[in-house]
Image (spheres, rainbow, N blue to C red):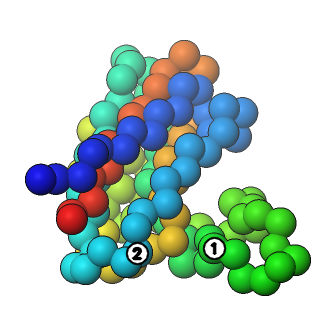
């Protein structure tokens, strides 16, 4: 039975609305994640799906939480500066995935649906 899809949605720009995050299960082998994005408006949203390899778990008793703004983010090469519906995947483990709406209408929205194998 497939995994439950994860939905990440941004209305407006990520710089003002936030960056929705998803932490995939890196213990699932093989690590495969399918991604489908939909521009939910007639606006001209420009967006990217991004990932980081930065560790997201507890690394010591002094660890107070994972801070996404301190992570190094890389654009998914299949969904970078997109302006229409797109799809892509991850065939390699990543620590976290986020949706980043870079420009467009404050009323426009983009949704990313992610499904992990397993």
Which residue is under mark 1?
57
Residue 87 lies left or right of residue 26; in this view the side is: left
| Viewer-side residue, 18 vs 30 | 30
Residue 41 lies left or right of residue 115; in this view the side is: right
Q: Residues within 10 Å of mark 2 (few under 14, many from 20)?
A: some
Residue 1 lies left or right of residue 27; in this view the side is: left
Report whether residue 88 is seen. Answer: no
Q: Quadrant of residue 66?
A: bottom right
Q: Position of residue 73 (x, y in %)?
A: 59, 68
Q: Where is residue 113 in the image (x, y as percent from the top left)?
A: 32, 43
Q: Quadrant of residue 92?
A: bottom left
Question: Residue, x 66% and y 32% (percent of image)?
Answer: 17
Which residue is under mark 2?
26
Numbered circle sitting on residue 38: none
Q: Quadrant of residue 105?
A: top right
Q: What element carries label 1?
A: loop
Q: What element carries label 2?
A: loop
Q: Residues within 10 Å of mark 1 (few under 14, many from 20)?
A: few
Question: Residue, x 36% and y 23% (percent of image)?
Answer: 40
Question: Residue, x 35% and y 56% (percent of image)?
Answer: 79
Question: Residue, x 37% and y 78% (percent of image)?
Answer: 27
Report whether residue 57 is seen. Answer: yes
Q: From what the image shows, is residue 18 above or below residue 3?
A: above
How many numbered discs sit on the rendered protein?
Answer: 2
Q: Where is residue 77 in the image (x, y as percent from the top left)?
A: 36, 67
Q: Position of residue 99 (x, y in %)?
A: 50, 47
Q: Earlier in the sequence, mark 2 or mark 1?
A: 2
Residue lying at the far left in this picture: please name it. 1
Residue 92 lies left or right of residue 46; in this view the side is: left
| Viewer-side residue, 70 vs 24 | 24
Q: How far apart are marks 2 and 1 (CA)?
A: 11 Å
């Amino acid at each position: 039975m497939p995994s439950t899809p994860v939905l990440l949605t941004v209305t407006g720009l990520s710089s003002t609305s936030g960056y929705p995050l998803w932490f995939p299960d890196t213990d699932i082998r093989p690590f495969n994640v399918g991604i489908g994005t939909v521009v939910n408006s007639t606006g001209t949203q420009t967006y990217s799906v991004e990932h980081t390899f930065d560790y997201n778990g507890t690394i010591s008793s002094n660890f107070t939480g994972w801070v996404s703004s301190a992570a190094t983010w890389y654009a998914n090469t299949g969904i970078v500066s997109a302006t229409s519906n797109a799809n892509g995947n991850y065939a390699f483990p990543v620590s976290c995935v986020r949706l980043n709406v870079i420009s467009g209408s404050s009323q426009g929205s983009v949704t990313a649906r992610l499904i992990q194998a397993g």
